[in-house]
Image (cartoon, grey):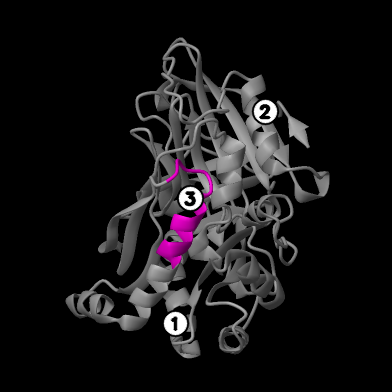
């Protein structure tokens, strides 16, 4: 575990502050004040560690039902990253296969204050240009399809109703990866576009999905389930698909249950159901579920309730985590976790789908999809490839 360690300046040169969901009015004058990095091997409860570290550095999030005001002159807030494996541990499930990128921490909390004057623009990284080698997948399309078939068998036995299956690919690189990762934030629909980095690692996010936020005094989650090409025919097909709608509604019910665990009784509601929105060249179905936080709900309790996200695990969640641990050959690393901003009166965490990461030698990328009884293995393999394609193209640019 590392506390108060500065951003990396060697293998991954330093950039300006580009944390997803950071307050736009503050980005130009944020300065790092304290940092926590934690790996699963360090032991302990990552949700409690995050809340305690924040409280010790002036970001009190022990009661999210209590209104709080942002201080424009003191501590601004913090970047928060929680891996899917850390979320699984916090939820009481298996962490899954070992990560293919062990340099990446499983929990990162970076507390920021306000500088007296705007920070100068970040300078360019070292010269030498940018080169990205060929992507090498951790499983073949046939192995991916076999995993889909195995999940369908588990559904047939009644073990689970739905399981999200995720694959991984890695590519060697030369040069500074941070500008490439930062480009992800410019993709259309990247609600949580941005980067977070440390010594020997970096994460770039283009996620459109809200894992959990606190908006106008309510807890909000926006699960995404259901994908088609962004054509008029693709939109009609998505809206008409009984399979996609059933899969989507299962996850909405799971998210309703997750929020109900930490909400005021009777306050959970579905504000929007199966709205079709665009991300790059894909249509996706999104719903909005909200609830009033229970009195005394802190950040740790909220993270335990919603992590890992239901749309990237399945239902029931703990049984789905067992299937994921049995089927996926490598861990989820930076993907399918949480990344965003927390501060006084503000929680805004995206789900790290459409996310890439760098260690000192390779870029890493993950993509997958939800499997139901009606899933076709070949179609699921193709859907994962379609989700990864815009990220691969932009990283290679």
Q: Is residue 107 in the magenta section? A: no
Residue 38 sits in quarter? top right
Q: Nearer the viewer, mark 1 or mark 3?
A: 3
Q: Of helix, strand and loop, which one carries label 2?
A: helix
The answer to whether residue 359 is above or below residue 239 is above
The N terminus - image quarter: top right
Counting residues from the N terminus, which is met first, the one under dot 1 or under dot 3? 3
Counting residues from the N terminus, which is met first, the one under dot 2 or under dot 3? 2
Across and down, in percent, residue 296 comes to: 55, 30
**C-alpha gap between disc 1 and disc 3:** 35 Å
Position of 32 compared to 392: left or right? right
- Residue at 62 percent of width and 27 percent of height: 54
Quick check: can you spot residue 189? yes
Q: Label 3 belongs to which residue?
A: 260
Residue 47 sits in quarter? top right
First to last magenta residue range? 251-265
Across and down, in percent, residue 338 comes to: 54, 48
Q: Label 1 belongs to which residue?
A: 382
Across and down, in percent, residue 349 comes to: 47, 43
Q: Label 2 belongs to which residue?
A: 53
Q: Nearer the viewer, residue 6 or 82?
A: 82
């Amino acid at each position: 575990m590392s506390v108060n360690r500065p951003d990396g300046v060697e293998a991954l040169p330093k950039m300006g502050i580009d944390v997803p969901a950071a307050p736009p009015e503050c980005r130009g004058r944020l300065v790092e004040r304290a940092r926590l990095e934690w790996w699963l091997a360090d032991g302990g409860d990552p949700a409690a560690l995050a809340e305690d570290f924040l409280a010790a550095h002036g970001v009190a999030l022990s009661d999210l039902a209590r209104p709080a005001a942002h201080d424009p002159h003191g501590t601004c807030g913090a970047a928060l990253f929680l891996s899917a494996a850390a979320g699984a541990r916090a939820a009481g499930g298996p962490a899954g296969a070992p990560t293919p990128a062990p340099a990446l921490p499983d929990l990162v909390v970076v507390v920021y204050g306000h500088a007296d004057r705007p920070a100068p623009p970040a300078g360019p990284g070292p010269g030498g240009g940018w080169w990205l080698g060929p992507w090498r997948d951790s499983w073949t399309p046939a192995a991916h399809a076999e995993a889909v078939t195995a999940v369908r068998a588990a559904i047939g036995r009644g073990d689970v109703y739905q399981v999200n299956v995720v694959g991984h690919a890695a590519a060697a690189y030369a040069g500074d990866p941070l500008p490439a990762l930062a480009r992800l934030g410019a993709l259309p629909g990247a609600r949580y576009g941005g980067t977070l980095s440390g010594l020997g690692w970096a994460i770039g996010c283009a996620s459109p999905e809200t894992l959990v936020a606190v908006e106008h005094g309510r807890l909000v989650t926006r699960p995404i389930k259901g994908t088609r090409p962004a054509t008029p025919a693709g939109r009609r097909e998505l809206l008409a698909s009984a399979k996609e709608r059933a899969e989507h509604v299962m996850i909405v019910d799971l998210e309703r249950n997750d929020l109900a665990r930490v909400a005021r009784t009777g306050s959970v509601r579905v504000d929007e159901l199966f709205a079709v929105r665009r991300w790059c060249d894909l249509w996706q179905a999104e719903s909005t579920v909200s609830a009033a936080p229970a009195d005394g709900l802190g950040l740790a309790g909220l993270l335990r309730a919603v992590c890992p996200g239901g749309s990237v695990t399945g239902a029931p969640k703990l049984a789905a985590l067992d299937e994921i641990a049995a089927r996926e050959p490598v861990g989820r690393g930076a993907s399918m976790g949480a990344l965003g901003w927390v501060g006084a009166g503000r929680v805004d965490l995206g789900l790290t789908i459409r996310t890439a990461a760098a260690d000192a030698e390779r870029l890493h990328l993950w993509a997958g999809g939800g499997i139901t009884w009606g899933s076709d293995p070949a179609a699921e393999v193709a859907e994962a490839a379609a989700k990864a394609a815009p990220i691969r193209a932009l990283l290679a640019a």
